[in-house]
Amino acid sequence: MVETYRPESLLEALEIRSRGALPFGGGTDLMVARRGYTGSLPRFDGTLLFTDRVAELRRVTVAEDVMEIGAAVTMTELLDHPETPALLREALALIAAPGIRNRATLGGNIGNASPAGDSLVPLYLYDTQVELRSLTGTRTLPLKELISGVRRLTLGKDELITRILLPLTDFSFTRYRKVGTRRANALSKLSFAGALTLGDDGTIKDLRIALGAVAPTVVRQEDTEQTFLGIPLKTVNPDEAARKWADAVTPIDDQRSTAAYRKQVALNLIAGFIRKAQEEL
Amino acid sequence: MKISQSITRFDAREKGTGETRYVADLEVDGLNYGRFYRSPYPRGIIREVKVPPLPEGYHMVDHRDVPGENCIAMINKDWPAFAVDEVRYIGQIILLLVGPDREVLDSLINRIEMALEEVPALYTMEEAEAGRSAEGVKVPPILGDTNLYADYHLSIGDTASAFARAARVVEQTCQTGFQEHIYMETQGLLGWWEEGQVAITGSMQCPYYVKHAAQVALGCAEEAVRITQAPTGGGFGGKEDYPEIMGAPLAVAVNKLKIPIRMVFDRVEDISFTSKRHPAKISFRTALDETGEILAMEVDTQLNGGAYESYSCIVLQRAIFHALGVYCIPHATVRGRAWATNTVPSGAFRGFGAPQALYAIETHMNELARLKGEIPGDFKKRCLIKTGDPTITRGFMKDKIIMPAMYDRIDQISGYRRKAEAYKNHPTLGIGISFFNHGCGFTGDGEQRLIKARAKLRRDEKGRVEILTANVEMGQGLLTTFRKIVAEVLEIPPETIIHANPDTNRVPNSGPTAASRSVMIVGYLLQEAAKELKARWAEPGAIEAESHYTMPPGLTWNQETMEGDCYPSYGWGINVVEVEVDPETCEVETRGIWAVYDVGVAIDNAIMEGQIEGGMIQGLGYGSLEKMEVKDGKFHQNTMADYTIPTSLDFPTTVSETMDNPFEYGPSGAKGAGELVFDGAAPAFSGAVENALGRAMPRIPLTPEIILEVLENEN
Amino acid sequence: MKIKFTLNGKETGGDWPAEKRLLDVIREDLGLTGAKEGCGEGECGACSVLMDGKIVNSCLVPLGQTEGARIVTPEGLKESPRGRALLDAFAQAGAVQCGFCTPGMMMAAEALLSRNPKPDEQTVREAISGNLCRCTGYDKIVLAILLAAEKGGGLW
């Protein structure tokens, strides 16, 4: 027997969560993961916490260059929001299909913590923070610390993802690329987000590369990125630069693609990004 | 021709509103559900099956309940309806559980345990040939001594002499993969007991095949089984064999329990355990003269037939009869083998062996053209077979052929020749062309010897005409095209003609809805019956006209030696596909698709275009997207998320035309088209990628992973 | 759980498990079989319905999240002038073959046109990218939706 709750206040939601309920946003992952044979009930046990009516989780506010996104905001709502940055917008637009995007939530995509989660890649690039709340308190931590492995979160059993805090950093040049199993309605074989800021003197002031579905979690190598700071963009050899990420890219063979393909294409996309930046800037 | 002018399909509105009732939509009082328990092991001998105690109202049906023969009566009877002791593939049906609540059934199914003495399995053609499992263990054959369902040999001319004088010999091996139909409506049947009959309705292409299979399993008389086709949400060949595989056990259950039982497959079950297109490995050895022209060709065709024979022998026959494509090669040998392996038995799928053969010959011809330094279209045009030329089955091509005119036309609309030259040195753009034909109807004398089709027209006392055949509407437009054919002769409005989904209690056996035969063969019978009806129209009361199939004059066929005219006529086609390859990801974007067809005469232009467009996209999926791998005896891609068919964004609009070339023995001159329009897409696509990258890549689906692998291996 | 929502313009309700799929409630408890199950995993769109004006896969919507929602199924669409215009267009364009995807395609068309009454071809293709069809190759479905937009006059 499955108990379900659909609270309208965050306090009520936290109270239900404190009793071990499973947070349920749009259900586009959970209803698939728990599906039974056609015509039967999905297999849930315990308690479900529907978050789609919790007012505090449904808001998007922009304050001082940070977009604060409620965990129960849907992909479509984010796509419709005028301040959603281009890099995130491009990723969201390629998630699944319209019917899924109308239901899927950002909090759910994070909570699912799939290595192939499409929204995660730009979120990692932007150094996104996540606000977690429980009845006993609030904490904020970087998204990269919240997701610790394949479908694993450092989330307390009584904690709820409440808001995603996305710094609206400006860049000189960005690029997003999803390599899916087909052109639409597709899971990612791998995905890429790159951002670069150039100083007036032509040197790199900021370089960020994030890769999805090529490791247990999104790949972001800040150490490697920093080795490029202060270097004139034009002097960078794109292929050599890409190879610096080679060890961080550790994909697998699975039913969608091969490790060899994912690895080579990831490096190609990094090199291509730098090349394109050199052309355009 | 006037008949070709499009009219609105008669079933469009009811389908659009959602009012059409497919088998899962039917309301039934006292309905029970059925679920198969399937073998979790690929191979071995069953020692024990432990079924938990069944609550009241729940029943088990297995081989002990079969009153007749425990087999799926297809061409052979090797496939048991319910496994007795031997298991040959993961998913093989062991028993059927029936009951009123699906949750309870699910729980019971999941608690069944089976103990089996395992034997190492043979999954690939190579393993089957070597008689060794993947681990290298020597293993007894699944079938006979050699694991072969068939080993056929065809030859014409004198290949030995031709090879002796060859300036060069080119060898190439082409491979094709599994393909799953992904009809949008999964397999489903509803069975019940009605006045001494086991009645079954559901999603199917061949009501009389289901009837036959049920009768053999029940060991009963003709009158004891009644099959009615329900609106069918797509077939593509997948509902040619599978309804018997589901239907025979269902008939046994209904016969035993005398209650209504419905089985509708979950999509994962459907993808995992229903028949797939035969994977193929086709090798060429071609002798060329000093100018690069073909002197002789040896073709070795191998198909993976899976665990039971099903249609493997006739799929193989079609594959070898199409081995030389549309070309005249007077010195040739073709060998065909179908292997038994411990995987889901392969079955019928649009094209039925021809897509594999045509993909291979077209890919090989592209290679020969490249060696000669000529664009493939020009090379292929020169090698085209002409009326009167010898065929691989030692017959003579009887069709009037308009392929040269079709080539000119497709060049006009696509710019093929100019682009093929221009893209030779372009790093990312490519264009490919395929020339192909498809034999219409059953092979050789199959229509005459096996099917013996009968079609009937009835005119009642009030002057209303009804069409009575066993052929089904499965999206291809039969509920409209059959009416048009009859209306054309009787000169009455087609909407006044009654045409219901077939019920074996009421319709004669006009044969299966398969082999691109419905319009050409059965439509012709209806045309002839309509002529008789017209002549007798003045007769009072209700009158019936029945037309029986006879082989068109001038055709000969010897099934023993496989010599003569393998098909009464052919549909012909040329496809052109233009692509751009992304150098970073090796993803391929299709930029243009063109198609020109000779289908005799189109009975309805809109319906024909719909078939062309649908066949093209399904064929492009086969060539580029639809990867289906076997891992440890199971299909690795078994959900709609992982088995990727094309979406609306994967390919651009198809530009197509038909050119009239009436066939005397088709209604209004029509020939078969349903499979032809699938056959050419994959080789045109892969040829385009090969043209873009300047190298052969003879494998489909030609995924970005394979493209990258080919490019990497050269570095 | 007891639940109430508006279905095709009428207040509807019942007592069903909260995790039950909306698709099963519509088809089996309420007898509306226009929405179909093609996959049960949100990939094919045959189960598409409109929920508060947006297209969703009803095989993924648990009943517990439908309280107070405005739901439209193919049965509701077909009764409306827009539904009839779409039906005319689909029939005229030759966009129906086996028919299994068609109700879902019409829901997607309605969802698109109510937001964007004059879409171009690419936009139409994006709008139906979550509805799979195996018969038509999509070309005539796209034509049908463009035709409905053109002939629909002031409907959208």
Image (spheres, coloured by chain):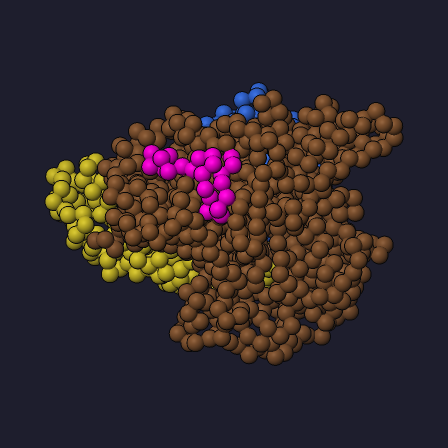
Which colour denotes chain C? blue
- The image quarter in which residue A46 lies: bottom right
With A258 as the anchor, is B503 left or right in this view?
Answer: right
- Residue A170, image x, y percentages: 27, 40
Report how many numbered discs are placed on residues in the image. 0
In the rendered view, tell whether residue B270 sits above or below residue B497.
below
The brown one among the chains is B
Secondary structure mostly seen in the magenta stretch: loop
The answer to which image quadrant residue A65 occupies is top left
Can residue B94 be seen in the rendering of this structure? yes
Q: Is residue A257 above or below residue B471?
A: below
Q: Is residue B86 magenta?
A: no
Q: Position of residue B687 (x, y in %)?
A: 35, 42
Q: Which chain is yellow?
A: A
Q: Quadrant of the N terminus of chain A?
A: bottom right
| x, y percent for residue B451 | 66, 48
In the foreground, C103 or B34 = B34
Residue at image position (39%, 41%) is B685
Q: Residue at x 68, y 74 (%)?
A: B52
Q: Is residue B641 visible?
A: no
A137 vs B23, left or right, is left
Residue B393 in magenta stretch: yes
Which stretch is magenta? B377-399
